[in-house]
Amino acid sequence: MEIAATGLVLMFLFSGLMKICTFLGYCVGKSKVSESERFSKKTGMCLPNASRIVFLAGVIEVLGSFLVLRGIWSSKKNISDVKTGSMILALFTILATLLFYVYPFKVRPFLANMTALSGLLLLPLVCGLKH
């Protein structure tokens, strides 16, 4: 169960760390269009503010991932941390999906995010069953 939960949140942890590193200027693999540029184009926000929002999104992703990982890997198995972390990541996923994939509707990314969302919503229940 710990390995499955870790696999579920690794995507968010990696994504969050990449957003933070990009904001701080330590981008490892630079794509053609940064997340900040994509967010700026989608929302009409100026690039410096979009970069700050994307950085904050990265911090939220890392925080949620950390809570889930701490909850499942600590010796006390804190289900409260798992629940809080998974709800943070679920809310993040809902907002990102609404912003980027609903209009215009993009089927594959939308379904991928709904799959991740389903796993996040089930995670506290599955972790609670074990204890």
Image (tube, rainbow, N blue to C red):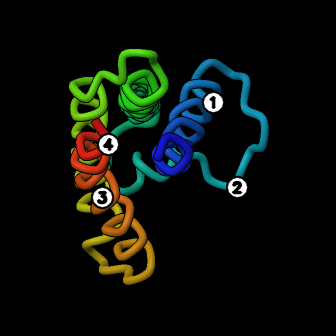
Q: Taking the image as drawn, is residue 29 in sight?
A: yes
Q: Position of residue 49 (x, y in %)?
A: 37, 28
| Label 2 vs 3, first from the N-terminus | 2
Residue 7 is marked as none
Whole-number angstrom distance, CA of label 3 to CA of label 4: 21 Å
Of the two numbered discs 3 and 4 on the same chain, state the one appearing first in sequence: 3
On residue 32, which mark appears? Answer: 2
SS at circle 4: helix
Which mark, residue 117? 3
Q: Amino acid at mark 4?
A: Lys
Task: Name the N-terminal-most of marks 1 and 4.
Answer: 1
Q: Residue at x 23, y 61 (%)?
A: 98
Please name the residue that numbered disc 1 is placed on: 22
Q: Amino acid at mark 1?
A: Thr
**Label 3: how many Cα within 10 Å (few below 14, some 14–19, many 20+):** many
Which element type, helix, strand or loop, lies under badge 2?
Answer: loop
Of residues 29 and 10, the one nearer the viewer is 10
Name above or below for residue 120 compared with residue 59.
below
Badge 4 is on which residue? 130
Q: CA distance from mark 1 to mark 4?
A: 38 Å
Q: Is residue 66 left or right of residue 44?
A: right
Circle 2 packing at 10 Å, graded few (<14), some (14-19), many (20+), is: few
Mark 2 or 1: the one toward you: 1
Question: Residue 76, how many percent across, how many down?
Answer: 36, 16
Q: Nearer the viewer, mark 3 or mark 1?
A: 3
User: In which quadrant will I find the C terminus?
Assistant: top left
Q: Which mark is first along the chain, 2 or 4?
A: 2
Amino acid type for the residue under numbered disc 2: Lys
- Picture coordinates of residue 71, whole percent (x, y): 37, 25
Q: Nearer the viewer, residue 114 or 31?
A: 114
Please name which of the two marks, 2 or 3, marks the residue nearer to the observer.
3
